[in-house]
Amino acid sequence: MHNKFYVTTPIYYVNDKPHIGHAYATISADVLARYHRFLGHEVHFLTGTDEHGSKVAESAAKAGQTPQEFCDITSGHFQMVWDRLDISNNDFIRTTEERHKQGVAFILNRLKEVGAIYESEYEGLYCSGCEKFITEKDLVSGECPDHKKKPELIKEKNYFFKLSNYLPQVEKLIDEGKIKVHPESRRREVMGLFKQELNDFSVSREHVKWGIPVPFDVSQVIYVWVDALSNYITALGYGQADDVAFKKFWPADLHIIGKDILKFHCVYWPAMLIAADIEVPKNIFITGYFTIDGQKMSKTIGNIIDPNELVSQFGSDPARYLLLCQFPFGADGDIKAENFVLQYNSDLANGIGNLVSRVTAMAEKYFGGAVPEQDDELKEPVAAIWQSYQEGLANFQIDKAIEGIKKTVTLADGYIDKNKPWELAKTDRAKLAKVIYNLSELIRHLGLMVYPIMPETSVKILNTVGKADFTNYHLSDLNHWGLLNPGDKINKSEALFPRIQ
């Protein structure tokens, strides 16, 4: 069995320009994809855009564009910002692509064949902002709580998915950990859904025109949720002539999603897969909600942070780091925009950057830029940091990896303060040699730890100790102590993170 890792982000709705909520989920997926590649696993990393539905058609009309033109432009914004953030996705799926349309039509035919779909009249309250039917009890003062407007009463003939037939199976899979939902607080939330009334859901819409036609009734289009969820398998070629990638990478090892789409991913999606006789995903990780300076992100308030602006201000690697280290992965959190500069200066300029330049400057000054004799005084503490770092990433806890980086910097700074190399240079050359070896080797480990989070910085750090070819090896070949050899060249580091005033 080959080691594979298939990770997906939600596909992002083209009615929005990319904001830091989108960036957070995508950078997280990228960190895990890079880490698994570094372990030597065959990785497939998918992201993309969700491009159908009445909201898109309305926005396109407002902009004086066809829906397809509108989608092309907005999807392009997402692809551009992922480039700027150095996202290493293997594929980018758009729901307007032919391969996706074919796959979704195949899935719907399959669900009809097995009797999981039936036709019925539906009358209900529909929020066009959410693109979903909502119940009276979801309303606050008669309005959708998210979009602050009254839903419309819609009556139409639709096709429905027999959700009730599959709920016991889905509940059992989550309960037994066959589908693992992370973090634990969200798993409890999902288990609570099964105690509520979960109705069969509509898989088609009669009055929406911008969408994929239902293959067995072209008077209807496939409901945007069924269309969107299917991307995880249509991107791999499910239901198409070339389904090699599907056979190789499915089931997904990890779906990363936001908590607003928890029910769709943890209940509806596994139910559809079970009905179609397709394996269910192994892990679903639910990220929290962001507020900005204590307020919900909103166009009206104008507090939406564009990831492009972060890259322009700080650079790609620091933007990635700053977004990921705001709060534990999976928790809700508040971002204080003015803290970005403080954190950049403390963690990156004064932390990692200062450490690397100090150590390489001392190696240059005291040993002419050559690695002195080997020593293993820091071997044990570094092994302990690696253990926690790797356990964290194995469980998708990206904050544990960031903690490992910070601990390594703290260890090095403390070691310098304790040993005072500038004094040893006058009194004890033999001890100085050991201290500089330990610090240089520590820098090599730091460069490896930084890689999934800040790939460019990692190359620069490892270049200072002559190990810039590290990506040709697996992490297990590199993360043990003592791989710098006496006489190896150490290059003085440029300022990795110039201080920002």
Image (cartoon, rainbow, N blue to C red):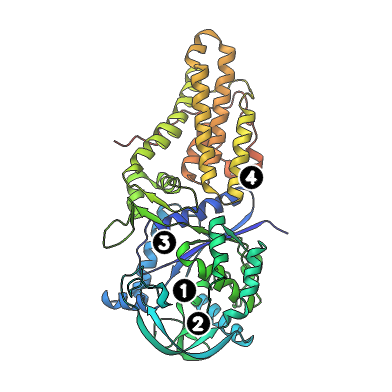
| Residue 310 seen in the current view | yes
- The kind of residue on which mark 1 rests is Thr
Labels 2, 4: front one: 2
Of residues 142 and 22, the one nearer the viewer is: 142
| Residue at horizontal 51 percent and vertical 75 percent from the top | 100
Q: Is residue 209 above or below residue 344?
A: below
Q: Position of residue 457 (x, y in %)?
A: 46, 40
Labels 1, 4: front one: 1
State how far apart marks 1 and 4 are (Cα): 35 Å
Labels 2, 3: front one: 2
- The kind of residue on which mark 2 rests is Val
Query: Tag 4 or tag 1, which sits nearer the N-term?
Result: 1
Which residue of the protein is positioned furthest toward the top in this rendering?
Answer: 427
Is disc 2 surrounded by few (<14), some (14 to 19) or many (20+) residues within 10 Å?
many
Query: Tag 4 or tag 3, which sits nearer the N-term?
Result: 3
- The kind of residue on which mark 4 rests is His
The image's mark for residue 79 is: 3
- The residue where tag 1 is placed is 95
State how far apart marks 3 and 4 are (Cα): 29 Å
> Helix or strand or loop: what does disc 1 sit on?
loop
Query: Tag 2 or tag 1, which sits nearer the N-term?
Result: 1
- The residue where tag 4 is placed is 474
> Helix or strand or loop: what does disc 3 sit on?
helix
Labels 1, 2: front one: 2
- The residue where tag 2 is placed is 203
> Helix or strand or loop: what does disc 4 sit on?
loop
Q: Disc 3, disc 4: CB below 8 Å?
A: no
Query: Tag 4 or tag 2, which sits nearer the N-term?
Result: 2
